[in-house]
Image: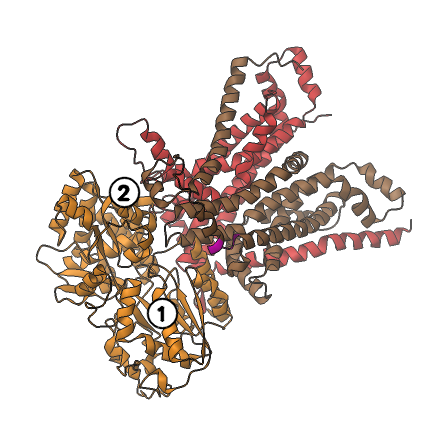
Amino acid sequence: MVQRTVHPVVKTIFMALLILWGISVIYPLIWTFMDALKDNQQFYFNMPWAFPELPLHWSNFSYVWNNYNFGKYFINSILVTAGGTILGLVLASTTAYTIARYKFMGGKALYLIYISSMMVPFSLALIPLFFLMNDLGLINNPLGLILVYASNTLAFGIFVLIGFFRSLPKEMEEAAAIDGAGYFGTFFRIMLPLSRSGLISVGIINVLDIWNEFIVGTILVNDPTRYTLPIGLAAMQVEMQYKTEWGPLFAGLLFTIVPVLVVYMFAQRHIVSGLVAGAVK
Amino acid sequence: MTFTVKKTAAGAMAIAMSLAVLAGCGGNSGSNNSAANSPAPASNTPANTAAPENTSAGGGEATKLSGDFTIQYFVGGYGDKWWKQVIADFKTANPDLNIKEEAGPQINTQNKPKWIAGDPPDFVYIDGPELNDRQMAEDGLLEDLTEWMQTATNVDGVKILDLLAQQPPQYGGKIYNVPLVLNSWGVFYNKALFEKNGWTEPTDWDSFIKSSEAIKTAGTTPFIHTGKYPYYINSSILFPAIVSANGNDYKLFQDMGNSDVEAFKSPAVLEALNKIVELRDKGFIDKASVSINHTDSQMLFLQNKDAYIPNGLWLPNEMSKDVPADFKFGFIPSVTQKPGDKVVANTSTATVAIAKNGKNKEAAKAFMQFIFSVKQASKFAELSGAPSNIKGDISSSSAPDFVKQAAAYLTADSTVVVPTVTFNQDVDKAMQDATVALTIGKIDPQGWVDRVVKVVEKVKK
Amino acid sequence: MKLGGAKLQRKLFIAAFIIPTFLYFCLFTIYPILQALYNSFFDWSGMSQFKDYVGLQNFKDLLQDPIMLNAIGNDYFLVAGKVIGIMLIATFFAIALTRLRIRGAGFFRSIFFIPNVLSVVVVGVLWGFIYNPQIGFLNAFLSLFTKEPVTINWLGFESHSIWMLLPPTIWAGIGFYMILLIAAITNIPESLYEAADIEGAGQWHQFWHISLPLVWEQMKISIINIMMTTLNGSFVIVTIMTAGGPDNSTQVMGSYLYQQAFKQAHFGYGASIGIAILTTSLVTTLLLQWLLRREQVEVS
């Protein structure tokens, strides 16, 4: 198609702005990497953008790796994120489907309860939550995090998925009914596969939320071997207050960022297509 | 209406601790939460002073200690060298004892569930973020040591109470914890830089201001502090200044600690606040101060960017890895006194205690008797870079010079030693906020007083 | 089909799909929240063994607390700043990357999303270093153009420090909303644009009359979402970067709740702040719904 209406100069300006923003996003990552190779002296006497001096302080990485269990954090993060996302999706999709496609007593009220819970500042619930989990014996237990995180994703998941299920054509259900599929069969065999992109979309957003969550985690996990990455990084930042170690801090940042970036690079297509599919009803 | 929510209470405290992760704290537990009211050791000796547990007056070796013994200690500005060593010594003395260490910069948070679950370590060193002795005592987590302390002796057979430079704090008239570290707030200066430039080391306010002028002229910023944790400047500048302005009588300061409204309205408070205003108006305060944390401020000090820093004596040890080879610390407990007047040392303590629900209180008591000895005191000074709370001459020990300098200050007649004062948390926060506002010219001293008085009145209600 | 059985079956199905989720949600989300709200009627330190019932006293105190009022102002400042900043930039990029056929659009799109996969902790640490007055990036950069080294304390202005929290939050928020908008725009039938092209309508005209109306619903959701996440979540970045300081000038309601409940041992009071956040976000949502209402454009 001919884009005859965009002036080349305008296009160049747009391009320049895009590149500028791109740099603002990419550069901090490069610079995190460079700073992870510096010692304290260089932070105080060299320009922030200066290349690290030789010899490079690779030891910052091993230092962080040995003193903080970043490998363990990574596994914990994966476990908790996967568990919380899947559980949250199962619970949200069933409710969203029912509310979207069936009229029943209390359906509206239920919807309102879920939606309004999104506005409640969750930090308020931290103390009662701690006691609940303590009573259930789920402190320092990945399952505890999974349960709470899944619950926290419900409202948003239901909200988005309802829109999704509503957009599916009514004929589908009718056809399924004629074919003799029961309620459950209709849901699992017809509706769920049809709304896959919506599920992916919600799932991805939940993955990001859970992966990066650390306030609830800080409350429910105190054992360093059970930390997730953000808790580990926050903990490291606290320890930095007792020993200024800029280089290792940046190395720690990198350990936290790189896994997410790798995941993002490989799952990018899914993330974007998921968001694309889910965002517009 | 009053509800009993015992379990809930302990847990909430624990959460408070874990949330402190976000907030951070000094090498010491801050200006206020490490210690006590005015010490009054023997004033309420119980009628029954017989302490059945204290059978081994001669020291730990009389009883055979065995089983598991768990020690929790926070590793902050003082490091863990001394703890490692004293625990090894204690192990040698008690080979049958299985000692477990629970330690680290985050141990206060990590051990939280154990305290809540009623399965705490036997012995705890109370220092670091948000581990608050007053709250632990009030929540019934600590063993009542009132009776035991009256007669308890250390391994050398000396009564522990007689050895202490600062007496144990009391909560509800009871002793729960014993100060192990006696430290002082004060002002550090970059001694090497002073020598190189021929600046005069400060002895009082006039010389402090004069040197600051010279420093500023030479192109260095005279003064930096951590605006993120304003209790550093409060404890090191403002509080000593109040005591000095009140004719070296710290009663006023203690009244402030007891949230006495009138005390805050005293002219001495205004006079002290005006000292900070003077620093501000003369442009001596580094503009970076207001938003940075203590480590950043300390780094800048070590990098010769600033000449003075208000801090606690743990500073050199805390920063030991980053101290340049040619760096020399100078220390004075206070700079706010008039020429010829006494120096004011605002102390800061960290305490040790025994868990009420501990399983090996015998060992915990024996350990307490073990660590409160003159020998361990000088080792503590040497390995932790801070004076311990045990009286005694450390001038011959191999402790760093500034520790000796500080210890000398703390024992000299020309020093007013102010016992650690604990403020109400709200009052303390209000003072911190107000001081920051003062350093950036948002309010004047009267505004400071008005603000804080409002909070004190509310607290008193 | 047997009617009676079908009815029962339907009921069973609905129950099976609704009840487990709801019970689960009640246990892990609603119960802790209600429990916390209940606490707002008490003077409770969160540490003491005793709670004193004080009725509405906490709320009365709240209305007279100057820090709280300032925090509300900061919250709305952040909401306004983020809504404007994020929506403008995200819309701009979304249009640029879809309608303008710019080369490497896919590349930019994936790059721009990166800050969204970073944890707030990471964002806070990075920007904290950019703002660092002595060894930070910004001052060093500005110093290139001045004689004297620049020593601006970006997070330490006596007031307006809150402004400095906008760039990190906008920086971190753009990608997500941009993707949402791109999705909305690509969903618009190409035929509409083709028709406009034929009629000779310019890009600007197309933006106003096709893109904007058709993505309006998406923008509305985005704006409300930004508002809610800001009111409920901005305290994390505040806590990491300024801890509410200097002198409470960057305090937001969430960070003040945190401060009161967990650091100053006023758990009851903190709970009442939580109710204030709840109330403000409800009111704001309704207000925004009303303000942003607009005829829904139907596309066949």
Identify whether B375 is placed above or below B444: below
Amino acid type at image mark 1: Gln
The colour one sees for chain B in the rendered image is orange
Q: Position of residue A197 (x, y in %)?
A: 71, 38
User: Viewed as shown, does residue A114 lie left or right of B272?
Assistant: right
In percent of the image, x 17 and y 54: which residue is there?
B335
Q: Position of residue C226 (x, y in %)?
A: 53, 38
Identify whether B45 is placed above or below C266: below
Amino acid type at image mark 2: Lys
Looking at the image, can residue C290 be seen? Answer: no
Instruction: Give me the chain that's red.
Output: C
The colour one sees for chain A in the rendered image is brown
Q: Chain of mark 1?
A: B
In percent of the image, x 66 and y 47: which residue is there?
A111
Residue position marked by numbered label 1 in the rendering: B85
Residue position marked by numbered label 2 in the rendering: B442
Q: Tell me where the magenta segment starts and ends, as one range.
A: A66-70
Identify whether C133 is placed above or below B67: above
The C terminus of chain A, quarter of image = top right
Label 2, label 1: how far apart the Cα atoms are: 49 Å
* Colour convention of the picture: by chain
